[in-house]
Image (cartoon, grey):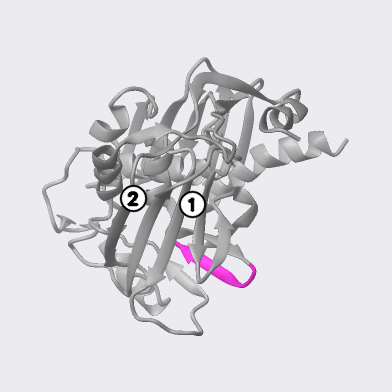
Amino acid sequence: MTLSATFNAIKSSNVISWKSTGRLQQTLAGFIEKTGKTLHSGNVSMVRLCPEFAGKGRYFEFRSRLIPASIDFAKESPLCTTLFKDGVQIRTVEHLLSALEAKGVDNCKIEILNMVADDQDVEAEVPIFDGSASAWAEAIEQVGLKEALDCHGNNAEKVAPFLNQPIYVQREDSFVAAFPSQKVQISYGIDFPQVPAIGCQWFSTTPLEGTCYAMHIASSRTFCIYEEVERMCNAGLIKGGSLDNAIVCSASEGWLNPPLRFPDEPCRHKLLDFVGDLSLFARNGSQGLPVAHMVAFKGGHALHVDFARRLSGVINNYTQR
């Protein structure tokens, strides 16, 4: 079945229609290689981004094993998004995938290597850098993009999932809802009443349009509450965390490492994560973000993945009829 035939077979779902974006699939014009410390394991890893054929999509390669950047392989894990397949897992993929999705890198092989070699390694983690997606977005901008061709030298249209009717997921008082729209729009809200310096924030934007992502989203850094740091450390997390790769806020003292890059930087970072997590809905070089107005409140990686699975389930249920 050709790539076009594959999408034609699923696009008549009542909820999702796959339609052409009017653009061709793209890949990197060259290679990107970056090395850095990881957030949770505290180890150092190297990531190499490679151009890839049209229709291949985005996928990781670790110890000669391939893990597609797909919701089918997402595993719920604390404070990050993890991909798991055949006993191997890749952690903290969200910032890299966010930049790839927003910058239009539809097809990409992502090689990852732990710099301290161990033949028994079954886990790798993407470097955290400064806690934002800037390092990836800037590197993609520098190397540039090119039209992706398949193994026969043919280009491929880029399609996107268009939402036909409202859909939502919810966990207690947290939710993600989406409504039909003519463009990709995300409105994100957070609420930390116990931390006055953060409080309730909302940010709304169209992340795939023009320079919006580069100027207003990519540089927003991950954040944490100072009073929760000990608990996270005791859980074996954030071993590589520092004031250089996160902004830290105390409930009583406010921000410990100002200045912020935006007054609502925490909220913008949640939106950055959302783009990365929803990129897992992409398939065969398509756009992952649905063409819809998505509204999220008090979300996190688990809820984002729930929403991507809900979208995927809509399609799988339809095609299995």
Residue 51 locus on image (x, y percent): 43, 46
The disc label shown at residue 31, or none: 2
Locate the C terminus and report the quarter of the image it occupies: top right
Q: Quadrant of the N terminus?
A: top right
Q: CA distance from mark 1 to mark 2?
A: 29 Å
The percent coordinates of residue 253 (x first, y second) are: 16, 58
Q: Is residue 230 left or right of residue 314?
A: left
In-image side of 3 versus 150 (left or right): right
Kindly state the secondary structure of the residue where label 1 is placed: helix
Tell me if residue 278 is in the magenta stretch.
no
Q: Find the residue positioned furthest to the bottom.
A: 119
Q: Quick check: 99 above or below 33? A: above
The stretch of residues the image draws in magenta is 86-91
In the figure, 106 relative to 301: above or below?
Answer: above
Please name the residue shown 67% across and 40% down the image: 312
x 33%, y 50%: residue: 31
Q: Point out residue 36 in the picture as x, y percentages from the top left corner.
A: 27, 65
Looking at the rendered structure, which numbered label has been put on residue 301? 1
Residue 145, disc: none
> Can residue 204 be seen by looking at this rendering?
yes
